[in-house]
Image (cartoon, helix red, strand yellow):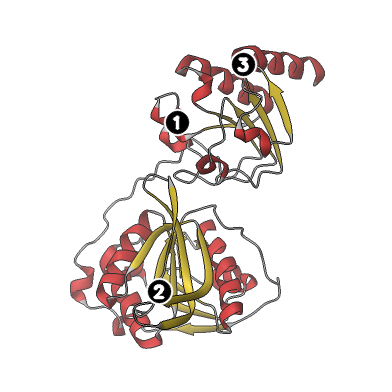
Amino acid sequence: MYCEIEDGVVADVSLELLTRGRALAGELGCRMEAVAVGHGLEGVAAQVFPYGADVLHVFDDARLAPYTSLPHTAVLVKLFDREKPQIALLGATGIGRDLGPRVSSALGSGLTADCTSLEIGDHEEKKEGRVYKNLLYQIRPAFGGNIVATIVNPTCRPQMATVREGVMKKEILRPDFTGEIRSYRVDDYIDETDLAVRVIERRMEKSRTNLKGASVIVSGGYGVGSKENFQLLHDLAAVIGAEVGGSRAAVDAGFTEHERQIGQTGLTVRPKLYIACGISGQIQHIAGMQESALIISVNSDPNAPINAVADYVITGTVEDVIPRMIRYYRKNTK
């Protein structure tokens, strides 16, 4: 499990993968090991061990931070070639999408990108008459999210996958869990050619949205009707302290920005309250928000599929219902 680290802090997607990796290792009866590559990694062990990492491989060197492709690839390729892991997981982030294919290509292992679920199971090759036991089921949406594909890799190792942020729960196994730390001499894993690229300056722009961390989300679909009507959702969000999201149909129609897209081909969220406005409830969208603690559906169609997963249903148009919600909320709160 490759840990993404920024300024000594392990990314949430890596902690989510550690949680899932611990469960997979339990099913397989093997160890779950994490890899930390960068600089200033003294506090990483305290962050990853509570999630059940049995071993932490540490490559701490000033030349490894910030992330650049070549040295991180060299480290993982040589480490994996030596350790022979069954499974290797990375986040489906900018770094993971750059690093994963490079490592898998060098090892000839293959890789499944943007997985939304990981399971352990068997696979039968009927032509060969052979059954492969305990393979990693790498599950991801395909054909624009219209189907869910299950991909297996019977023979090549490691079985590699990148996994989307937010699709798996981040859950501490035990606060006092400890594992083994293995520190490495970086010069044994990289050479001068791996350091051909040097980062001179970094400028990082913060995201304008925080859907993953939002406790309340107001989300709109194609049924909102227009970009102008979508402003009503922003008005409601401003009043109740929420973030605004959207379905793929709303994004494709230009009602809202792509970074606000929720669903199989967007973000997966788990807020305390999810208000779905004008969203029909296709399975691709429901997959991204069904674990919300409380779901309210605002829809003019009483038979909309999303109503089946909603805790409360308000039948009516967005133009009629949302202004009333804003008005009553302001009236009944101090």
Residue located beneath label 2 in the image: 159
Which secondary structure, mark 3?
loop
Q: Residues within 10 Å of mark 3 (few under 14, many from 20)?
A: some
> Which of marks 3 and 1 precedes in the sequence?
1
Instruction: Name which quarter of the figure residue 248 lies in.
Output: top left
Which residue is found at the position 36% from the left and 84% from the top? 185
Q: Quadrant of residue 307?
A: top right
Question: Vertically, is 251 above or below 125?
Answer: above
Is 287 situated above or below 255? Answer: below
User: In the image, which is nearer the foreground, mark 2 or mark 3?
Assistant: 3
Q: Are marks 2 and 1 in contact (CB under 8 Å)?
A: no
Mark 3 belongs to which amino acid?
A: Thr
- Residue drawn at point x = 41 percent, y = 70 percent: 152
- The amino acid beneath tag 2 is Gln
- 302 or 165, which is in the foreground? 302
Residue 257 appears left or right of 14:
left
- Residue 71 in sight here: no
Q: Which residue is mark 3?
A: 317
Q: Position of residue 70 (x, y in %)?
A: 26, 68
Q: Secondary structure at mark 1?
A: helix
Q: CA distance from mark 2 to mark 3?
A: 48 Å
**Does residue 330 appear in this view?**
yes
Picture mark count = 3
Give coordinates of residue 101: x percent, y percent: 30, 65
- Residue under circle 1? 249
Q: CA distance from mark 2 to mark 1?
A: 34 Å
Q: Residue at image x 62%, y 19%?
A: 300
Marks 3 and 2: in contact by CB < 8 Å? no
Q: CA distance from mark 1 to mark 3?
A: 17 Å
